[in-house]
Amino acid sequence: MKLYNSKTKELVSFVEAVKLGLGRERGLFCPSYIPIFTNIDEILEMPFVMRSQKIMRSFLEEEIGGSKVDDIVRKAFTFMPQLVRATPRMFALELYHGPSLAFKDFGARFMAQCLNLFAGKEKITILTATSGDTGAAVADAFFGLDNIRVVILYPKGKISPLQEKLFCTLGKNIHTLAVEGDFDSCQDLVKTAFSDQDLCSKIKLNSANSINISRLFAQICYYFEGVARFRDYYGNKVLPVISVPCGNFGNLTAGFYAKAMSLPVKRFVAATNANDTVPRFLNTNKWEPHKTIPTMTNAMDVSEPSNWERVIEHFKKMQVHAKGNNWQMNEENIQGISISDAQTAAAMQALHKNGYVAEPHTALASCGLSKSLKENEAGIFLSTAHPAKFKEKIEEVLGIQIFLPDKLQKASSKKILSETISSNYKSLKEFLLS
């Protein structure tokens, strides 16, 4: 599998892309082709892990070997997505049943297994930015791995207390930095570090953000599981509309890769909060990021999503290679919807009345799906985090008590080990070289 740099003509292997993280000129690595399944009904009937191994083999077997691919998937995916009916026509695809209680576990654990295999004895520094859940997933996936140092940046005071406790209390090879700024500031620091040739000549840098292509490949797998379980209710007579809560847009990118592989999806909903750069772009074809606005869906407070570049690249490529299929960037394929905090809270309440408890990001996705669904349509909204990770907000909005799972209960009493730095790049560079 060759991957190309979205900014240059640079071509790399999958192993190189995983180890580099980011390409020259801050370009993102994109697949040069998408494998297509002609036996999709047979694929959807497989068990989750076996199907995931087949999906990943279609990308990676030629380069690293089928048995190694199978081993990576088996070690990474020790938990499963679950599809739960939330309303008569809407289903929650729960992706939070992994160790850090968030969907990021799929990508982070897959990447950790890849990097652990590819790096050998080489010393690597993982540098990543998080708006909440990535930090915990990456910290858990890489904790204790030999020769891998992890440095996680997050916006100070802008993630939930329990999110912070999950990844800022570990120590050992996990280092956490609270940045005086927003998520975009953190992300910009990461990109600046990767383009700093002096720094890169002294330490081996890698990123575990959705910038890293290995994470996106892993996320393809749960879309297949969601559609497979959707068929338990509708057979192949109804194609699901899938609503994705979007921040940095890696999750949606993986969804488009899944659809290109022939996964039967009617369309995607790109559900954002007030940081609505993409919905506005889809309406006007003008890319005009505004200043990031803090919202109750803090993990999605991103005004300049990095992975949108990959979405643009994907549509360009599929228009050329899809053999007549419709891959225009229109409402038949993608619908951008911005949801306010008030609408998100109302969605949490509406789901609760139906017996389903959702944290804000999940509720936002459900609201986007509800707005998009037409008569005789049904769909899936991605549930990206365990409700207990947003205990305070759920108790405030719903007036119910949320009990913490054991992992969160244990983390809640631990001491935060983070250091605070400014959003000035000099502060980060000094830390990385110390």
Image: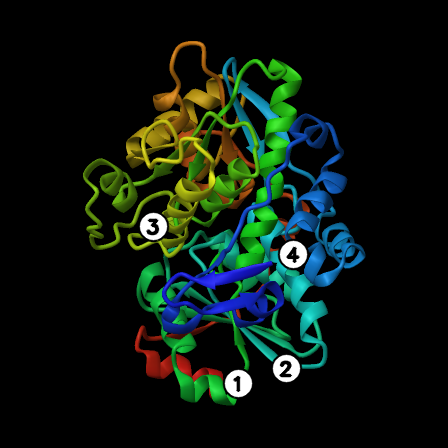
Q: Are marks 4 and 2 in contact (CB under 8 Å)?
A: no
Q: Which residue is mark 4?
A: 109
Residue type, mark 1 in image: Ile
In terms of sequence position, does the residue under pointer 2 or pointer 1 come before the other?
Answer: 2
Say which mark, if any, is on residue 123.
2
Tag 1, which secondary structure?
loop
283 is higher (above) or lower (below) than 305: above
Residue 213: percent from the left, percent from the top? 53, 58
In terms of sequence position, does the residue under pointer 1 or pointer 4 come before the other?
Answer: 4
Mark 4 crowd level (few <14, some 14–19, many ≥20, 10 Å Cα): many
Tag 3, which secondary structure?
loop
* Residue 138 left/right relative to 188: right
Mark 2 to mark 1 CA distance (whole Å): 8 Å
Q: Are marks 2 and 1 in contact (CB under 8 Å)?
A: yes
Instruction: Give me the residue at 46% from left, 22% from top.
Output: 351
Q: Which residue is mark 1?
A: 203
Mark 3 crowd level (few <14, some 14–19, many ≥20, 10 Å Cα): many
Residue type, mark 2 in image: Lys
Instruction: Give me the residue at 25% from left, 50% from top.
Output: 293
